[in-house]
Amino acid sequence: MSDFTPGQRWISDGETELGLGTILSVDARSVTVLFTASQETRTYSARQAPLTRVIFAAGDRIVDAEGHTLTVSDVEIDAGCIVYHGHDEQGTAATLPEARLSDSMRFHQAQDRLLTGQVDRNDWFELRYRSLHHHQRLSRSPALGLAGPRIDLIAHQLYIADEVSRRHAPRVLLADEVGLGKTIEAGLILHRLLLTGRASRALILVPPSLTHQWLIELLRRFSISVTLLDEAQSEAWGDENPFDSGQCILASQAWLFANPQRQRQAEASQWDLMIVDEAHHLDWTPQAEGPGYACVARLAARIPGLLLLTATPEQMGLESHFARLRLLDPDRYQDLDRFSAEEAGYAAVADAIDALDRLPGEAAALDAVSAVIGAGDGDSQALLATLANAESDDTQRASARRQLREQLLDRHGTGRVMFRNSRRHVGGFPERHLHTAELDMPAAYQAQLDELAAGNDHVAARLHAAELGPREARLYPEAAYRAVQEAALQADTPWWEQDPRVTWLMGLLESLGRQTKVLLIVHYRQSAIDLAEALRVRAGVQAPVFHEEMSLVERDRAAAAFADDEAGCQLLICSEIGSEGRNFQFCHHLVMFDLPWHPDLLEQRIGRLDRIGQLHPIDIHVPVIAHSPTATLLRWYRDGLDAFIAPHAAGGDVLDAFGEALRESLDDESGVDTLIDETRTFNADRLAQREAGRNRLLEWNACRPERADAVIAAVLEQDNDPALPRYVDQALDIFGVDSRELGNALTHLAPGSHMLDSLPGLSQGDEGFTVTYSRTQALARDDVQRLSWEHPLVTAMLERVLDSSLGNTALALLKHPSIPGGRLMLELVYRTHCPAPKQLQLGRFLPDTGIRVLLDESGANLSDKVSFSGLSRNLQRVKKGVARELLKSRHEQLRALLKSGEQEALRELPTLVERAQTEMRDTLDGELARLKALAQRSGAIRADEQAALGQERADLDAAIESAALRLDAVRVIVTVDNEQR
Ligand SMILES: Nc1ncnc2c1ncn2[C@@H]1O[C@H](COP(=O)(O)OP(=O)(O)OP(=O)(O)O)[C@@H](O)[C@H]1O
């Protein structure tokens, strides 16, 4: 008798994509099946039809032709066809004849696929299991998101990146001294957030001169491709919002800040994170906010994550610095006066933090801490009581000490949003050597100075027209000369014909030799352009210019011409603003053609060369005209501040205190010695005060060596993880990627002719790329990519496997002397499943977690006795047809084992849920306590903010509580006797 009856539902073994078929007709030799969803009809031999009968059982959820769901409770056979009995979504009893099952039902889930006879290759199943295992292992690694980037492992950077990216919607100021790697830190944070899915869209705003550098660094070091947006690109988007054109958008601040319509579009787009580089330019005063500040403030009010980057946070004054901190953390920074006054108490806070190590036991230490905390902060007082209590155990004390340190820093110290590392603490930076040259005053410049001193109206008017203030006119004589003499056509010669600094520069270049690179910074853009012309005309030297008004392409061309080792130019001439943030550490001679007024700008200049990667001492050359205002400024910087030798921590304060006197000294040198003495004393006092308080606090916050070491150790462990090459080899093989050893630890990857699917950089027709597992190799060679667990190719393979049904069923044979043949075992892999709104970012507490259950035929759990790899090693493959027959014959038994497997796996779920809940509560309760404590101090924290956090905690709690398990993959194992092989 035929197995087939018209109306029955079957699926094609070889073409499952056809959907659910219906038997149309049967005769002695053939069977015809209609696949309605794909509008295909197939006729097969009735004896060997590659079809599997679809039969559901109690507990299965099935869908009818109208899309209604029925949960099956009973199955009845009526004239060869099945009628399902069960309950609909409302719980009402209902029946569904199989003929009315939805034609487009697809069988992706492991159980459905298994019971409909769809088995994948055994090695696919293994790849799937290993993918889940590694995904889960890596998602708990302290190195997550930090191990992949192509960077040297530098402790302070990894600490900051780890600390900041752990925070929910991080908002921080990255304020390391110039050149210590803020861009790298921001890249690491972005990389971790993107990799973990905690951010998917980022807006990066940088000065125009840095767009390309950011683009390249993000791609080369972090494999993050960003869309560079400018006006031309935006226009191409017509009425659509150009900011929606990519996941990560990089744009020039100058462009966006000047363009209200584009700002509105940026605000209308959805972002998770905004990064603003060189953020000291965002200026604010109680009377007026600058356009950059206003734009960033509006965006920051909408975007949850915010990273502000600046090496010189106080360059625009303390008020602007405070306003930026307030953007980041309005709860902590509410009152400018209070903020300014707080610094006086920082030494006591730092002492209190030191005192924590002397507790319990020392009464004076207890008093010191208690005095800083104050009576109102019950939360911190309770921790202090735990720490001081002789009966607390070591773990309790260590935890109380750690939390109190955080709270003292955050609530009473420099706060937790600012991270500033200094060269002194990081160490290993080169020395700086100052070389000055004293030059004669040219007559034209002396005449200019005389007229300025005499208050000549005509000169003042011309300077005013050229937007030169009295200070600028004195410090930048060539600019004054241009404004007064050249503009009035009174000059026979351009300024550079008589400026002795030009002649001196020609001599310096010659004495250093053409192979020695020299970077020159001059305050004004026009002076930079003139200087290039002067060198060309007077010395035949071609020096590219780099300034803020150049187009991107021109700027990059200039930088490239300078950087080129072989054919490169000896000298690059930069304007002040144009060079900010750029990487020029391949050169170690810096010429300051003039001096900037603000000490922070001086540090920014030196920072172009004195950066991570600089291998030589820095030679700073400053030509000064004798008895000129610049000579006075040089002495003040050198003798008053030691500003050329090392970064000065209190430059802004010193300028605030002595700026006026210094301005006066530019005209009259007589008081300079006294001014320098006073500056020295003030600077030394201020530094001592900062060292006792603020700097100690900043240092504590900026890098905790033990945490940094733990992250580095975890990264190194991943670098040397033997499982990675094994996994990659297996995955490449399954995905059909060709790999060819090139020697020297390099491998070339290329798309194979049978590739399953295209992968990043490996679509059909691509040439492929060369990879290495070695960090050192990858850092040394730009043309080689480093394979890590976080490389886009590896993450894509992991995702493809885990997000599809690839390998979620398999059948294999086991031959073992102690196990008789003909037995069945089931290896089941369950995965946690916890639907929650994306903004809750539930994965931080409960990432997808796998549970493996191995059952023997009787349902006994062998998971602990037989490991996955141990079992896998002994398994043998089976032909698909044989596997299908085996499955058909064991249907009932399989169903029973699937049920027991679920019960076994469910036993482990409560532990996972509890761990996730504890972690979540620890984190959010800490946050809630912080808000309460800050509210108590200032009384100004919004009640709705506390309520929102409370709600988030409740939502997370409920979501974690509702975690369920679903079957991710299943492998049937059939034991065979030796001779059965
Ligand atoms: N971990 C690292 N591995 C390799 N190179 C690094 C690392 N950290 C920094 N660098 C390099 O050092 C230079 C300075 O880094 P970066 O530009 O991030 O500093 P920054 O603090 O942003 O500088 P600035 O204050 O000038 O804006 C860059 O060339 C960068 O590529």
Image (tube, rainbow, N blue to C red):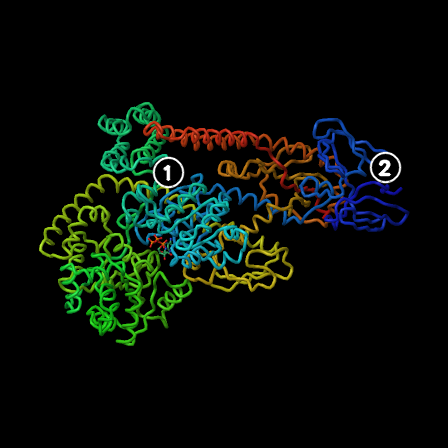
Give percent across and percent down for residue 946: 43, 29
Rendered location of residue 616, percent (x, y): 28, 61
Tell me if I can see residue 864 in this picture: no
Residue 113: image location, x then y, percent = 70, 43
Outermost residue, left direction?
Answer: 670
In this view, 167 is above or below 607: above
- For disc 2, the marked residue is 80
- Residue 24 sits in quarter: top right
Identify the residue shown where x is 47% and y is 56%. 229
Ligand 1 within 8 Å, label 2 CB: no
Q: Which mark is residue 826?
A: none
Q: Residue 891 in the image: x percent, y percent?
A: 75, 37
Q: Earlier in the sequence, mark 2 or mark 1?
A: 2
Residue occupying image coordinates x 83% and y 44%:
23
In what element is the residue under mark 2? loop
* SS state under label 1: loop
Question: Which mark, by number, is residue 329?
Answer: 1
Q: Residues within 10 Å of mark 2 (few under 14, many from 20)?
A: few
Is 924 situated above or below 886?
Answer: above
* Amino acid residing under circle 1: Asp
Q: Is residue 384 left or right of residue 631?
A: right
